[in-house]
Structure formats: C-alpha cells, structure tokens
Image: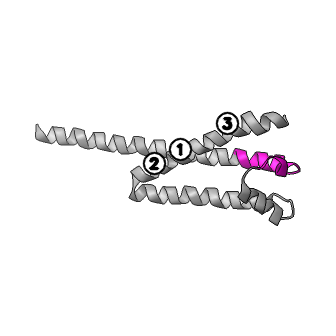
Amino acid sequence: MKGVWLALSAGTHDAHKMVRKIIFDILCWIILLVGAIDTYWLSKNRDSIMEFEKNPVGRYLISLDEGDVSLFILCKFIGTFAVIYFLQKLFIKRASSALAIAITLALFQVFLLTYLYCGVVAGII
C-alpha cells in the first residue's frame, strides 16, 4: 500500500510541476506580447511620441537618436528578450522565484497595456 501512495504522490508532484511550467510560460508570453504591442504603438506614433512617452529612459534614448525611435525600439527588444532569457534560466534553478517575478512583470505589462488603450491610444484614435 505504501508503494501505491508514493506512486500517486509522485504523479501529483509531476502534475504540479507541469502546471507551474504552463503558468510560467503563459506569463512569459504575456510579457512578450504586451512588449510587442507597446513597440508597435511606439513605431506607429513615432512622429508624436515625445508628446506621449512618459518613460524617462525612453525619452532620453529618443533624444539621443535625434528624435528617432529606432534606438529605443532596439533597447526595448534587447531588454525584453534579456528578461525572458534570465527568467527561463532562473526557472530551472528556482522555479518559485522565477514564477513570482514573472507574475509581477506580467501584471505590470497588463497595467501598461490598459494604460495604452484606455489612456494614450484612446486619445490618439
């Protein structure tokens, strides 16, 4: 009987790990998708972006590139992919920590998306 219980609990543990990995992957996709949407709107509104951009680093990168958004877009891509890369590496070593960070970042991204569509984009369209 003890062997059956160990087998069942091992299966439950594996299922729990699989569900945690699926949730983590969904959170990473949310981070990537919102980043892509944000970059799309940045590119789409490149002529008037300084009027709407609130990020001081973004504003600095745009001014550094003489009003062009290309450097800002490059930095956004590099930053987003670096975050996803490090989250994936962290998940292998410390899944709980990676999951907590991914939840925080995904929530921030959802708030950003809400701000873009309810705030800035609504005013443009």
**In contact (CB < 8 Å): disc 2 and disc 1:** yes
Determine whether 4 is above or below 31 in the image.
Answer: above
Q: For mark 3, give the secondary structure.
A: helix
The disc at residue 27 is 1
**With 26 as the anchor, is 118 left or right in this view?**
right
**With 41 as the anchor, is 35 left or right in this view?**
left
> Looking at the image, how many numbered discs can be counted on the residues?
3
Q: For mark 1, give the secondary structure.
A: helix
Magenta span contains residue 29: no
Crowd tier of the residue under label 1, counting other residues whose Cα lies within 10 Å: few below 14, some 14–19, many 20 or above? many
Crowd tier of the residue under label 3, counting other residues whose Cα lies within 10 Å: few below 14, some 14–19, many 20 or above? few
Q: Quadrant of the C terminus?
A: top right
- Within the image, what quadrant is residue 29 found in? top right
Identity, as a three-letter code, of the amino acid under mark 3: Thr
Residue lying at 46% horizontally and 42% vertically, measured from the top left: 22
| Magenta residue span | 37-53
Q: Which residue is mark 2?
A: 99
Determine whether 2 is above or below 74 in the image.
Answer: above
Residue lying at 35% horizontally and 41% vertically, measured from the top left: 16
Determine whether 26 is above or below 73 in the image.
Answer: above
**With 49 as the anchor, is 6 left or right in this view?**
left
CA–CA distance between discs 2 and 1? Answer: 8 Å
Identity, as a three-letter code, of the amino acid under mark 1: Leu
Q: Is residue 124 visible?
A: yes
Nearest the viewer among 83 and 21 is 83
**With 53 as the anchor, is 78 left or right in this view?**
left
**In contact (CB < 8 Å): disc 1 and disc 3:** no
Residue lying at 56% horizontally and 48% vertically, measured from the top left: 105
Q: Which residue is mark 3?
A: 114
Q: Quadrant of the N terminus?
A: top left
